[in-house]
Structure formats: structure tokens, C-alpha cells
Image (cartoon, rainbow, N blue to C red):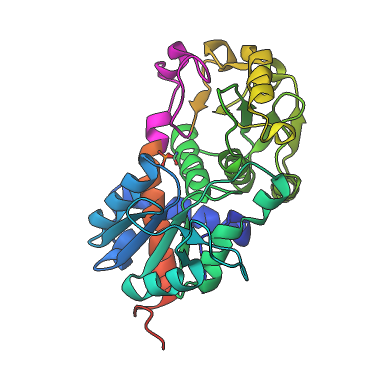
């Protein structure tokens, strides 16, 4: 069973094919989503969403299928993922039952489950989405997990391809920005994985103490080497952004300050001058952010409202790339729904 849990489970060439498929579909090639017809996608949300939920629903409807949305702890039971625990807490149901049950109703299972941001080593295990992948009998799609947001990363790649015409050897800079609370690293991880797989020169810039997951950076460096490019990590935002083709902005929390909200807030204030403005993007560069974005804290109004900002195109491309991903998973899964007993 092939899932869409991590970009790292695919080769860069396979990922590039998905981008090409999504671009063809966006230009009107309907056969790029032919497998979606009369199929059901069940989406399980442990966390809120605007774009992810809507873009998946729209992708399924446009392809002639249907999407069901469940909000864990809201309109459905709280779910346990750990093995061997006595379930005397808030969770009424275990993923061991929920995943196979939902697999009987639909053709695909999509899950959003953010990092807990208590222990980076625990987050790196990505246990909730892995539990769904272990116990589902249909393909599982990652709608943002503790470690990755692969649909976002692929939509970002598609957007860069559209805007720049090519990705090979172009300069991609991911810059950290301040916030009001610690945020997960799934989006920055997927952004740099996608940029590396796309053959770009990758630079990550952040203040000391905001290092991304070492395993992800190893994979990014490996994919860069394969493409003849390099990964650089820097604490000098101004220099890093100079001459960038893409300035990708994202806030994330310091792993050293998890569970220390006051110290994290003070650290954000210390690096308040990392807010990204028009001066960080060259005349031919593009500004990217996954959204939602806090204006004038993460990115200045003047830059978000500038033609160099492609954030709305990125959000639209979520729908097209997800169609391509679903199409590929359904083709790989064969034509029948799972009903093995
Ligand atoms: N970028 C993104 O995943 O947006 P939502 O959190 O609104 O789904």
C-alpha cells in the first residue's frame, strides 16, 4: 500500500512527475484527475484548517468524487494512537479501529495532526500519522503532520515552476520570522525538501536556537548533492536573502524553548527585526508563505500586497497538486475499494 505521508518516501523524479501532472491539469487536461470520479476521500482533522480542508473538498468535487470531513474531539470521538495504554483518559476510540473502519467507507484517508511541541524527538517520530498508515487499508494522505506538510511543499514547487519557468539551479531562501507563539516545523521542512528535490540552491536562515530537524536537513543536503546544488544554513538573514529567486517566509518555535511560552515570547521580541519586508526580496524575486500569515509581524503589508507576492497562487495550487497526488494514489491502489475481511 503506497501512502502520501512523507516526500522522503519518493524519488525527486517521481515528485517532479506529480508537479508536471498538476500543471497539465491546471491548464485543462481532465485525464490528469480521471481516477477521482465516484471516489470518496475521508479527512480526519486533529487541528483547524482553511486551505487544506477546502482545497481537498474542491479537488474531489471537481474530479467527480466526494469528501467527508471529521473533526477529532468536535464532531467525532477523540482518538488514541499509543499502543498498549489503558484508555481511561479523554480518548474514546483507538486509531487501530478507527483507521480500518474509515477505510471500509472510502477510498482514501487524509489526516491532519500537528506536532505537540513538547519534545522534538517525540515529534520526529510522527506517531499519529504513522499509526493511521499502519492500520488503514486504503492510501493515507498527510494533510500536515508533526514532521512534514508534503502537499504544501509540492504546491510550493508547482508555484515556483509556474512563476520562474524553471527551478534547476535557482536560489531558494527559507527565512524564519517572528510570531506570538511557537509553531511547528512541518511547513519549513517540506518547503526545503521540495526546493532540494526541484534542483534548487537551498539556503535556510534563522536565529541561533531555531535549527530544523537534522534528519530532514540531511535529506535536503543529499537531494541537493544529487542535483549538483548545495544546502547552506545561516544566521545572517540580510545576506541570505540577497539575490534570492524565492524568499519563502515561515515562523517556527525554538525546540530549546518548547513549553516555555514566556521565554519563547521574549525570544520572538529579541528577533523582531526578522519581520520580512520589501527590502528582503529583489525586483525579480518572489515572496512565498503557506498562509495563514500574521501581517506586519511575519511579513509587512507592503510586501504581501506587492506583485512579487505569490501567496494566493500557492494556496490555489494546493488544489491542483492534491488532485495529482490523489490520482496517482488511486491508480496505484487499483480500481476497487478496500473490503477485505
Ligand atoms: N497552508 C495550510 O495548510 O493552510 P491551512 O492551515 O488553512 O489548511
Find residue 12 and report its image quarter.
bottom right
Residue at (25% x, 66% y) in the render: 37
Q: Is residue 112 left or right of residue 174?
A: left
Residue 138 in sight: no
Residue 303 in sight: yes
Bounds of the magenta span?
A: 290-314
Question: Quadrant holding ligand 1?
Answer: top left
Whether residue 117 appears in magenta in the rendering, the answer is no
Q: Which secondary structure dominates the residues rendered in magenta?
A: loop
| Outermost residue toward the front in this view | 88
Q: Position of residue 4 (x, y in %)?
A: 51, 60
Q: Position of residue 105 (x, y in %)?
A: 32, 72
Q: Position of residue 321 (x, y in %)?
A: 41, 50
Whether residue 301 appears in magenta in the rendering, the answer is yes
Depicted 16 relative to depicted 300: above or below: below
Residue at (37% x, 83% y) in the render: 339
Q: Position of residue 111 (x, y in %)?
A: 45, 56
| Outermost residue toward the bottom in this view | 341
Amino acid at each position: 500500500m503506497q501512502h502520501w505521508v512523507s516526500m522522503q518516501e519518493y524519488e525527486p523524479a517521481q515528485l517532479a512527475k506529480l508537479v508536471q501532472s498538476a500543471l497539465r491539469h491546471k491548464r485543462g487536461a481532465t485525464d490528469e484527475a480521471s481516477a477521482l470520479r465516484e471516489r470518496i476521500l475521508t479527512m480526519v482533522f486533529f487541528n483547524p484548517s482553511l486551505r487544506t480542508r477546502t482545497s481537498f473538498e474542491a479537488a474531489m468535487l471537481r474530479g467527480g468524487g466526494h469528501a467527508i470531513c471529521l473533526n477529532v474531539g468536535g464532531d467525532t470521538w477523540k482518538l488514541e494512537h499509543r499502543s498498549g495504554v489503558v484508555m481511561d483518559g479523554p480518548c474514546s476510540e483507538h486509531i487501530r479501529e478507527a483507521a480500518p473502519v474509515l477505510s471500509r467507507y472510502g477510498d482514501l484517508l487524509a489526516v491532519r495532526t500537528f506536532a505537540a511541541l513538547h519534545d522534538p524527538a517525540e515529534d520526529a517520530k510522527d506517531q499519529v500519522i504513522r499509526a493511521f498508515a499502519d492500520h488503514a487499508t486504503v492510501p493515507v494522505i498527510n494533510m500536515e503532520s508533526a514532521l512534514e506538510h508534503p502537499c504544501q511543499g509540492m504546491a510550493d514547487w508547482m508555484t515556483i515552476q509556474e512563476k520562474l519557468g524553471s527551478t534547476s539551479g535557482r536560489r531558494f531562501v527559507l527565512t524564519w520570522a517572528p510570531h506570538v507563539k511557537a509553531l511547528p516545523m512541518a511547513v519549513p521542512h517540506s518547503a526545503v525538501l521540495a526546493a532540494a528535490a526541484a534542483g534548487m540552491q537551498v539556503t535556510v536562515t534563522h536565529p541561533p536556537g531555531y535549527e530544523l530537524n537534522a534528519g530532514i536537513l540531511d535529506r535536503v543536503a543529499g537531494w541537493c548533492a544529487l542535483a549538483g546544488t548545495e544546502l547552506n544554513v545561516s544566521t545572517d538573514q540580510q545576506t541570505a536573502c540577497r539575490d534570492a529567486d524565492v524568499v519563502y517566509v515561515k515562523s517556527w518555535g525554538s525546540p530549546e524553548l518548547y513549553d516555555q511560552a514566556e521565554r519563547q515570547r521574549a525570544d520572538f521580541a529579541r528577533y523582531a527585526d526578522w519581520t520580512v519586508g520589501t527590502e528582503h526580496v529583489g525586483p525579480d524575486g518572489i515572496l512565498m508563505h503557506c498562509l495563514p500569515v500574521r501581517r506586519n509581524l511575519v511579513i509587512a503589508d507592503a510586501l504581501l500586497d506587492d506583485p512579487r507576492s505569490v501567496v494566493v497562487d500557492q494556496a490555489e495550487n494546493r488544489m491542483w497538486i492534491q488532485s495529482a497526488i490523489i490520482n496517482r494514489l488511486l491508480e496505484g491502489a487499483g480500481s476497487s475499494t478496500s473490503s477485505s475481511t
